[in-house]
Image (spheres, rainbow, N blue to C red):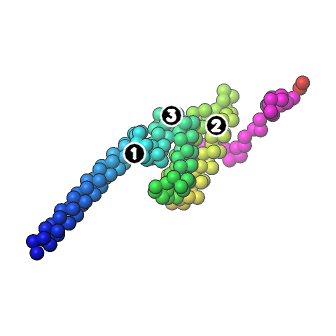
Amino acid sequence: MKKHANRKNQLLILALLVGLAGTAYEAYQTNRIGKVNRALLAGEVFDDESYPFHKKFSDAYQQGKTGNFKHAVQGFGQTLELANKKESQTFEVSNALKSNIHYNIGNNLFRSGLQRLVTADGAIQEEAKFDYLQAKASYEQALKLDPTSRAAKFNLSLLLGVIPGNIKTVPQDPSGMEISNLPQGLP
């Protein structure tokens, strides 16, 4: 009987040690995830390589916050690519999150277009037109993914109020372009 009680005690001590190790690991993971969440909520960039999606998102957000809209759009585009890769994900990216990425792309393009709004003669610059059209497409994509996004609806309505309804880009003159190292145009 004594031997049997000793065996039970050993098994219970082993179960206790495994439980304590599991609890310590879960506490560590919870603390680590909490740091990532706090950094994301504060709008800070963090360098934890185990969360590549979140790292890229926070970096792109910070780029847009500092006025570097071109890099912000590129970063959000890369974030969208990460979101669409099924094999490298450890979590499911919802349509609402993809909508948020498109919304942020639209915001950065809109702000970029506002920076270079008009030329010296008062006309809208070609780069601004391009940014506006791309922002419009991004907001529309955000609304396709999440039709309840009030922020995307509001910003799309602002964008449509800023740009003329008949905005078209001017086709570029191809005469000076080179194709395969052969100049086109006059010899």
Identify the residue at horizontal 60%, vertical 37% (top origin): 113
Identify the residue at horizontal 83%, vertical 29% (top origin): 182
Front-most of residues 83 and 118: 83
Q: What is the secondary structure assignment of the residue under circle 1? A: helix
Marks 3 and 2: in contact by CB < 8 Å?
no
Front-most of residues 163 and 145: 145
- Going from N to C along the chain, the mark reached first, 1 or 2, is 1
Quadrant for the C terminus in the image: top right
What percent of the width, then of the height, locates residue 33?
35, 50
Mark 1 crowd level (few <14, some 14–19, many ≥20, 10 Å Cα): some
Mark 3 crowd level (few <14, some 14–19, many ≥20, 10 Å Cα): some
Position of 123 compared to 139: left or right?
A: right
Which one is closest to the eye, mark 1 or mark 3?
1
Mark 2 crowd level (few <14, some 14–19, many ≥20, 10 Å Cα): many
Identify the residue at horizontal 63%, vertical 45% (top origin): 134
- Going from N to C along the chain, the mark reached first, 1 or 3, is 1
In the picture of the structure, the residue carrying the numbered disc 2 is 128
Q: CA distance from mark 1 to mark 3?
A: 19 Å
Disc assigned to residue 40: 1
Identify the image quadrant of residue 8: bottom left
For the record, the magenta segment spans 157-185
Label 3 sits on what residue type? Gly
In the picture of the structure, the residue carrying the numbered disc 3 is 67
What percent of the width, then of the height, locates residue 91?
46, 57
Q: Is residue 23 visible?
A: no
22 lies above or below 108 = below
Q: Is residue 63 visible?
A: yes
Q: Is residue 175 one of those drawn in magenta? A: yes
Identify the residue at horizontal 13%, vertical 70% (top origin): 3
Q: Is residue 64 one of those drawn in magenta? A: no
